[in-house]
Image (tube, rainbow, N blue to C red):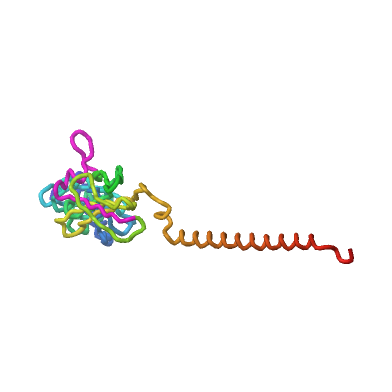
Amino acid sequence: MPRAPAGARAVLLIALLCRLAAAGNPELPTAVNITWSSINFKTILKWQPKPSGYFYTVEIHGQMSDTKKKCVMTTETECDVTDALRNVKETYTAHVLSVKSLVEDNFEEPLFASSEKFTPYNQTIIGKPEIQHHTQKDSKLTVVFRDPLTPYMFPNGSFQSVRDIFKHDLEYKLYYWKDQSSGKKDATTKSHTFDISVDNKNNYCFYVQGTIPSRRENRNGQESTVLCTTVGRTILDEYGAEVFIIIAVVAIAVITLTIILAVILCKCKRAKNAREKEPLNGV
């Protein structure tokens, strides 16, 4: 019987050793607690546990797009998958593969765990709007703000805003209230400006929040910084009527005490003068 060539025998030996090595190793742990974290379409995939003696590779599977690999052979437990989700209306599933260093040369499929489905357009959280300036003049409060930006760019290199992607699905709400009051009112706009009628005798505090009314989840975005107007602020607005009552009571007490002391001093002076005018005894 003819013997196989030396090269063929070497290939067979290597393949046998690889299979024996794979059979001799316990199964690798698979990822657990896989979660999507997405704000303004910047999306991070997270999972557990920290690997020891093996690696992770992330595969992004879209319903209508080719599979994309991210964070290949990583020892981290999170991966920025933003640029693999450019079709924001598509629904994706992530596979987190547990792999050995030689897995790419192995014929066996690596073990993996799957994430929940994720649709960026429906699930990313709208970030904080930036309030650019505000004024309160007479009975009108004007607030101008800017949309949050996304990681995605136009061909000219400028960043797209959330409004560029959501378009008419996006609204903003202004929540406002009299300074030092708890009663809130709100107004809605699809532009970048709020013009609100207010009481010109009071200062107002407010914040802006993006919202997608058509959504079932993550409808409301993050709240902007709370700001307050300072036009027409008086001491009464600043400290309240209670302070004025205390000041009035103290003032009355001081005045009363001053009058009493003045009367006592006057009486003492008169008594002293009277004693000085009396003739000395025996003179």
The vertical placement of 236 against 133, above or below, is: below
Where residue 102 appears, as percent x and y from the top left, is: 26, 50
Is residue 146 among the parts visible in the rendering?
yes
- Choose top left, top right, bottom left or bottom right for residue 147: top left
Where residue 41 appears, as percent x and y from the top left, is: 22, 48
- Choose top left, top right, bottom left or bottom right for residue 135: top left
Q: Residue at x 20, y 57 (%)?
A: 219
Extreme-top residue of the structure: 156
Q: Nearer the viewer, residue 263 or 196?
A: 263
Is residue 100 among the parts visible in the rendering?
no
Extreme-right residue of the structure: 282
Q: Is residue 74 magenta?
A: no
Where residue 16 appears, as percent x and y from the top left, is: 22, 54
Relative placement, left or right, of 80 versus 247 is: left
Q: Residue at x 34, y 59 (%)?
A: 181
The vertical placement of 118 against 156, above or below, is: below
Which contiguous range is marked in magenta? 151-178
Q: Quadrant of the C terminus?
A: bottom right
Q: Nearer the viewer, residue 1 or 77?
A: 77
Where residue 160 appears, as percent x and y from the top left, is: 21, 41
Q: Is residue 155 magenta?
A: yes
Q: Residue at x 41, y 55 (%)?
A: 236
The vertical placement of 207 against 275, above or below, is: above
Q: Residue at x 21, y 47 (%)?
A: 69
